[in-house]
Image (cartoon, grey):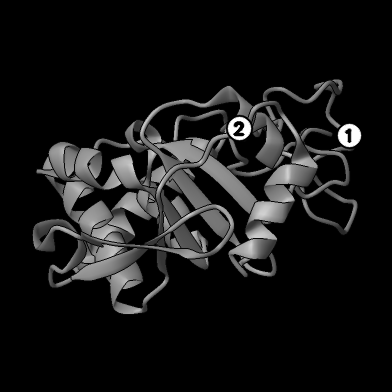
């Protein structure tokens, strides 16, 4: 698959770049995508939820009323879950939600997500993205010139550019990542992928 290369003014440079088929044109594996997204979301969970059970509630253990003759059910403790303020039955406890996923499955998931984006023609290749200073206004102008300012965009850079990262972080629908930190969830969440020209080769090296 060949795509035209654009500059940050939104105009074609006259050059084309070939996207490697083994990364951008595979048969997507939906189950691998599901597992990778599930792992990513699970890793975002703090797992610090906690509810007190009957052994942890601060109430007296004194028997509330006599065992027989009241006409009501037996009651032995104010901590019982049947009373308001009593301990919770099987309440949540702190836990780790993360789980292991094989490296090859994660690679397959990312290739599948990139193949979906390529198939939907939602990838733009830029010759370079460089800013002389952190300026949100300048980055917003670039998105406007590329006609993607109304969409959720994911800009993938070959290496960290602090000026670009700082310029984009205040724009709600945009996110900037490097090739090394690219994940399946971010690819699928974005409407349009913006790839710096050097990113394509680096993606091919990492995913193959």
Residue in view at x 23 percent, y 63 percent: 112
Quadrant including the C terminus? top left
Residue in view at x 48 percent, y 38 percent: 177
Using the rendered view, name the quadrant where residue 92 is placed. top right
Nearer the observer, 153 or 67: 153
Nearer the observer, 6 or 194: 6
The x, y position of residue 61, in whole percent, is 80, 22
The answer to whether residue 102 is visible is no
Residue in view at x 9 percent, y 59 percent: 22
| Residue 153 vertical position relative to residue 121 in the rendered view, above or below | above
Label 2: which residue? Answer: 165
Which structural element holds mark 1? loop
Does label 1 or label 2 sit earlier along the sequence? 1
Q: Is residue 108 left or right of residue 165?
A: left
Q: Is residue 130 left or right of residue 181?
A: right
The answer to whether residue 156 is visible is yes
Check whether the beta carbons of the residues at disc 1 and disc 2 lie within 8 A of each other: no
The x, y position of residue 55, in whole percent, is 67, 24
The x, y position of residue 67, in whole percent, is 79, 41
Q: Is residue 89 left or right of residue 21?
A: right
Which structural element holds mark 2? helix
Using the rendered view, name the quadrant where residue 124 is placed. bottom left
Quadrant including the N terminus? bottom left
Nearer the observer, 122 or 146: 146
| Residue 168 vertical position relative to residue 4 in the rendered view, above or below | above
Residue in view at x 51 percent, y 41 percent: 129
Label 1: which residue? Answer: 64
The x, y position of residue 206, in whole percent, is 18, 37
Q: Nearer the viewer, mark 1 or mark 2?
A: 2
| Residue 192 vertical position relative to residue 36 in the rendered view, above or below | below
Q: Is residue 126 left or right of residue 179?
A: right
């Amino acid at each position: 698959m060949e795509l035209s290369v654009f500059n940050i003014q939104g105009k074609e440079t006259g050059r084309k770049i070939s996207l490697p088929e083994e990364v951008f044109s595979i048969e997507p594996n939906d189950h691998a995508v599901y597992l990778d997204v599930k792992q990513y979301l699970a890793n975002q969970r703090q797992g610090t939820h906690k509810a007190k059970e009957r052994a942890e509630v601060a109430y007296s253990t004194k028997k509330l009323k006599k065992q027989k003759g009241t006409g009501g059910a037996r009651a032995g403790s104010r901590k019982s879950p049947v009373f308001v303020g009593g301990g919770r039955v099987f309440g949540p406890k702190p836990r780790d939600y993360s789980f292991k996923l094989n490296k090859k499955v994660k690679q397959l998931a990312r290739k599948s997500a990139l193949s979906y984006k390529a198939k939907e023609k939602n990838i733009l290749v830029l010759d370079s993205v460089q800013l002389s200073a952190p300026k949100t206004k300048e980055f917003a102008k670039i998105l406007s010139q590329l006609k993607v300012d109304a969409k959720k965009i994911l800009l993938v850079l070959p290496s960290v550019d602090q000026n670009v990262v700082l310029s984009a972080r205040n724009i709600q629908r945009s996110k900037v990542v490097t090739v090394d930190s690219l994940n399946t969830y971010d690819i699928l969440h974005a409407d349009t992928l913006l790839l710096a020209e050097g990113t394509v080769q680096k993606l091919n090296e990492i995913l193959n």
